[in-house]
Image: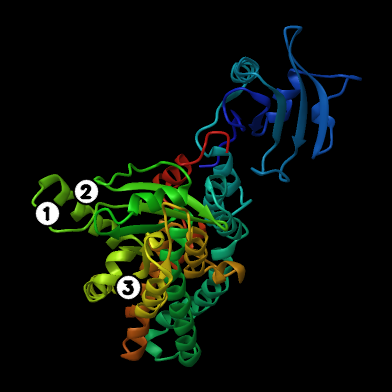
Amino acid sequence: MIQNDTIVALATPSGVGAIAVIRLSGENAIEIADTFFRAVKKEKSLVKQKSHTIHLGHIVNNNVILDEVLVSVFKNPNSYTGENVVEISCHGSSFIQQEIIQLFLQNGCRMADNGEFTMRAFLNGKMDLSQAEAVADVIASNSAASHQMAIQQMRGGIANKLKELRAKLLDFAALIELELDFSGEDVEFADRTQFKELVAKITFVLKRLIDSFSFGNAMKNGIPVAIIGEPNVGKSTLLNALLNEEKAIVSDIAGTTRDAIEDELIIDGVAFRFIDTAGIRDTEDVVESIGIKKAYEKAENAQLIIFLVNSKKFVVENSKFKNEIKSIQNRFPEKRLLVIANKIDLIDEKEITQLESEIEHLILLSAKNNIGIDTLKNELTSLVNIGALSNNETIVTNSRHFEALNNALIAITSVQEGIDLEISTDLFAIDIRECLRYLGNITGEYDVDKDILGHIFSNFCIGK
């Protein structure tokens, strides 16, 4: 799969800007760039320059200057792709960008495919597959939390976690295979006690990584928070107050919101995806009924649920609302639930004290008057377990890794069962190989299907 041709692409976003960077990579990258480069002060050949040097000059085509540029030279293997790489910083005119790219396309280069620079870095051993995937996550990160997880992964987070365990399992696998060669002689080369300990350790690590995916995926894509409650309780007003914009229509007419409205907000470096849902009540309106059904579906898929109640109504009908809270807790037992009493501007101090005594950890606010919004934001971030991030723990955010880890766990569980039942070594040797294969797929140490690689890197931008 390793290509020897030279590729070119725009490495910065397309469009007009102060500067643009055009990247070339391949065996002939420096020679091709050198053909059209003229240094400002004196004649110089880019081919003869040291790696990691920058040169001021012009890109010239048939004695016509296209632009004044800075050319950075990186010689193999000390470059991003492991090949000869040239990066040309030119002015950000779309016309200039295309003129330079077309010049190289007509003189020995071809247009890079999506993610081909990073694919070459992987194929040339500059990074493993999990690190290559993390490059795309770094580019796409939109919050401090998602950025931190991507950087940790790019530095080899999950690979380092699995490397030692996989190496030990390989050693035992070799000994098990050796036993199969001497199967007629009833000998054991692999210490079964140590093997059991290793299998138990691998099982523990795999389960921990698998369990981290739910949190990691939410942190990467935004933690979904469903706002539910009766009609006209202020759900849309709360969404608008959190986002500080008129995202949802607010009306005194009950049932205004009939479909889910979503938007994202970053609080203290963590992305939350708030979902305003239709008011929950008994209704014969077909459209509203569909909206209510959707509200429950959104709550089912959310990690956090905000149950919003009317402060005044809660004071009068506290037993009713307590039953509703219990009903939601029973319906979504694994969800974190925040109970919020809205419209506290309509009740007095005595009633506020009564509310606080009725429900533990109740949040009081007035979405309309922007009272208590900061308290809610602080509570939301406190509910998110970001301790794993601050402790630099490995967190799985990639669904491909999640699937491979699950398959590896199934295989290693079969190995454990085989050991416990003291079955013949040759029966669970297959499961050991399966576990090794799935772990190797994560980092690319095991042969990875060409189609899978193509799918992974097709999600990258062209210049990366």
Calculate the distance from the C-alpha at mark 1 to the C-alpha at mark 2.
10 Å
Quarter location, residue 299: bottom left
Report the amino acid beneath label 1. Answer: Thr
Q: Of helix, strand and loop, which one carries label 1?
A: loop
| Mark 2 residue element | loop
Q: Residues within 10 Å of mark 2 (few under 14, many from 20)?
A: some
Name the residue tied to disc 2: 255
The three-letter amino acid code for the residue at tag 2 is: Gly
Q: Nearer the viewer, mark 2 or mark 3?
A: 2
Task: Name the residue type under label 3.
Answer: Glu
Residue 100, by quadrant, is top right
Mark 1 touches mark 2? (CB < 8 Å):
yes
Label 1 vs label 3: CA separation?
Answer: 28 Å
Q: Which mark is residue 283?
A: 1
| Residue 366 vs residue 230, the one in the foreground | 366
Residue appearing at x 42%, y 66% in the figure: 364
Residue at the far right in the pictured view: 42
The vertical placement of 187 against 346, above or below, is below
Q: Residue at x 41, y 60 (%)?
A: 345
Which badge, 2 or 3, comes first in the chain's sequence? 2
| Residue at numbered disc 3 | 334
Q: Position of residue 240 (x, y in %)?
A: 42, 47
Instruction: Describe residue 316's horizontal placement relative to residue 94 as left or right.
Output: left
Q: What distance separates the C-alpha of mark 2 from that of mark 3?
A: 28 Å
| Residue at 58 percent of width and 64 percent of height | 157
How far across and how far down the image is residue 94, in percent? 60, 18
| Residue 381 spot, x, y in % from top left | 51, 64
Locate residue 335 relative to residue 321 in the image: left or right.
right
